[in-house]
Image: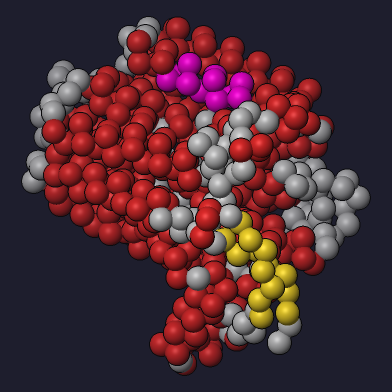
């Protein structure tokens, strides 16, 4: 057995102590042993896997991740995303306002760079992670308590959904930083901990999806918030018990660390500016919800300013790739305020329409879409794994645009002429084929984001890049509200859907196709296995490439939400 130096977190006297331990031998993972062996002995393999996890990371840390990824990132994130459609429809909110409020709710994901920066440079109450998670969890718990207890205005509800998303974003970001740190300290564990995160997230997400649809159909929306309240609060227990292993900082290292901020002031400054821009966008959307021109003018102006700032603050290759991924998110204009309402509208609003109930639209479609999304991951690895980046991106953009055709077929009722029911067509087209196409487009962004992270600044760089893409989705939602207005889509009586087909074509096909020529300028002509930061085009070192692959897979866990309720990194 090899003896290695590890850092063990000890609660005694709140001191981080160094200790030399005999590391348990690494048993073969599922990848090493092969799927045949795993399928032949599933229970033994699972038992060996859990023993290996416990030996390397300890049961307390595993429970901490279970709390964070099954509870918060899995169940809570899914509840928050799926409940908004029936909730706002019950309040009498039209599709345009629903999309505005949805944009406000996801704003914290565009602020991840700020959360990462502030936790790095200011250990609040002596902790880099614990204090921030406790504060975020308190805000999230309070938001669900208020949503479940009172009948609130739509604007106030949007603010509370914002606070709920703060909890999800902060818990996800800081827990991800911790297990990534432990992975680097225990490289012999490979992707074991990522598998645990992935599995717990998806189980939690599918459990939440299975509950949300049936409860929404019965009209008991407030019951969902009461389910969310203890889920939001429970994460405080393992954090308060110290199971995240976040050491308390000595008095001399507390306070704002100006030296660390100044050392990377361009990167930190850009992350803070982007977070501020996203927050102001949410405020404008809330207080100027009727003034579409104000929202659009701010969105276009601040997007241009941030993209120009990135060119000065980031290395050229990183800046160009970041610009492409921002445009990839922004140009696929999200129009959930039109589509979600059309698919779930009553007969008097959409005569002869699909009239999907929430059990089908939020539960069955979500479950099938999750399976299809992971089929897309497998296809990406099998087919595109050795392609050049430019080819990957332009092909994936075209495939995603082709997937948008199915909505046009259903909206024009052409599927009925073919003898295909609405539920069958939607399940095959949107839940399966489109999700595979969307995943093939989303996966390259995950891989590219991971590979562009600067050494020793991986967490901050990833949070900033992911924040840019999430801000791009916020821009996409704001532009979508403008499109819904100019195409004269009305989701309340008297309903009007005459321009919906053209709206889908423009938002989901024509505008995204503008990215195809941009790939040849913004994306480097290198293979996906090359070193993108070194500029040499040489393959990366095996250990570094392995670390990046683990980071890529650790951020694929949001693939089970359709684009107009888009996955957020």
Q: Is residue 159 left or right of residue 328?
A: left
Please tell me whether residue 279 belongs to the stretch shown in magenta.
yes
Please give left or right for residue 196 compared with residue 163 in the image: right
188 lies above or below 98: below
**From this viewpoint, which residue is outermost toward the right?**
536
251 left or right, relative to 106: right
The spot of residue 377 in percent (x, y) is: 54, 61
Magenta span: 271-282
Residue 168 horizontal side relative to residue 523, left or right: left
Q: Is residue 100 visible?
A: yes
Q: Write the residue at 54% across / 42% down.
A: 127
Q: Residue furthest front?
A: 13
> Which of the two residues, 123 or 355, is positioned nearer the viewer here?
123
Q: In the rendered image, is residue 178 in sight?
A: no
Residue drawn at (82%, 32%) of the image: 316
Residue drawn at point x = 42 percent, y = 20 percent: 282
x, y percent for residue 5? 72, 70
Image quarter where the N terminus lies is: bottom right
Image height check: is 53 above or below 344? Answer: below
Residue in front for this viewpoint, 552 or 508: 552
Nearer to the camera, 357 or 507: 357
Q: Residue 491 in magenta?
A: no
Give the total number of marks visible in the rendering: 0
Q: Write the residue at 27% across / 34% down.
A: 142
State whether the magenta stretch is mostly helix, strand or loop.
helix
């Amino acid at each position: 057995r090899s003896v290695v130096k590890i850092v063990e977190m000890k609660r005694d006297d709140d001191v981080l102590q160094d200790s030399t331990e005999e590391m348990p031998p690494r048993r073969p993972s599922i990848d090493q042993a092969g799927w045949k062996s795993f399928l032949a002995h599933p229970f033994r393999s699972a038992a060996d896997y859990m023993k290996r996890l416990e030996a390397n990371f300890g049961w307390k840390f595993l429970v901490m991740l279970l709390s964070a990824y099954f509870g918060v990132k899995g169940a809570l994130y899914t509840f928050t995303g799926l409940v908004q459609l029936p909730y706002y429809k019950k309040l009498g909110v039209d599709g345009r306002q629903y999309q505005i409020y949805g944009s406000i709710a996801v704003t914290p994901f565009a602020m991840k760079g700020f959360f990462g920066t502030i936790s790095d440079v200011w250990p609040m109450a002596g902790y880099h992670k614990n204090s921030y998670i406790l504060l975020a969890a308190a805000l999230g718990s309070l938001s669900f308590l208020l949503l479940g207890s009172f009948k609130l205005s739509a604007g106030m509800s949007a603010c509370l959904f914002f606070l709920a998303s703060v909890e999800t974003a902060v818990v996800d970001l800081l827990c991800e930083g911790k297990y990534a740190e432990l992975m680097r300290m225990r490289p012999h564990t490979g992707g074991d901990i990522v598998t645990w995160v992935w599995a717990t997230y998806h189980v939690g997400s599918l459990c939440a999806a299975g509950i949300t649809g049936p409860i929404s159909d019965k009209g008991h929306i407030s019951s969902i918030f009461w389910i969310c309240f203890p889920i939001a609060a429970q994460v405080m227990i393992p954090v308060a018990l110290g199971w995240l292993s976040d050491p308390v900082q000595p008095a001399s290292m507390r306070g704002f660390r100006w030296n660390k901020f100044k050392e990377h002031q361009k990167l930190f400054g850009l992350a803070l500016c982007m977070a501020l821009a996203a927050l102001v966008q949410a405020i404008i959307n809330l207080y100027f919800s009727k003034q579409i021109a104000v929202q659009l003018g701010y969105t276009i102006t601040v997007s241009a300013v941030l993209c120009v700032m990135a060119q000065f603050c980031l290395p050229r290759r990183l800046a160009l790739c970041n610009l492409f991924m921002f445009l990839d998110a922004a140009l696929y204009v999200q129009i959930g305020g039109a589509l979600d309402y059309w698919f779930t509208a009553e007969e008097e609003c959409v005569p002869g329409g699909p009239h999907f109930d929430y059990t089908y639209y939020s539960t069955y479609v979500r479950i099938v879409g999750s399976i299809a999304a992971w089929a897309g991951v497998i296809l990406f690895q099998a087919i595109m794994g050795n392609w050049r980046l430019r080819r990957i991106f332009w092909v994936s953009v075209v495939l995603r645009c082709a997937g948008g055709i199915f909505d046009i077929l259903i909206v024009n009722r052409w599927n009925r002429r073919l003898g295909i029911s609405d539920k069958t067509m939607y399940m095959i087209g949107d839940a399966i084929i489109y999700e595979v196409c969307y995943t093939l487009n989303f996966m390259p962004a995950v891989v590219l984001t991971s590979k562009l992270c600067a050494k020793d600044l991986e967490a901050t760089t990833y949070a900033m890049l992911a924040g840019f893409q999430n801000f791009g989705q916020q821009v996409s939602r704001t532009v979508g509200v403008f499109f819904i207005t100019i195409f004269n889509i009305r989701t309340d009586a008297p309903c009007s859907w005459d321009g919906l087909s053209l709206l889908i074509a423009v938002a989901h096909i024509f505008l995204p196709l503008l990215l195809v020529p941009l790939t040849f300028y913004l994306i480097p002509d290198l293979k996906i296995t090359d070193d993108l930061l070194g500029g040499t085009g040489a393959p990366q070192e095996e250990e570094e490439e392995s670390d990046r692959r683990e980071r890529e897979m650790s951020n694929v866990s949001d693939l089970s939400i359709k684009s107009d309720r888009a996955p957020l990194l």
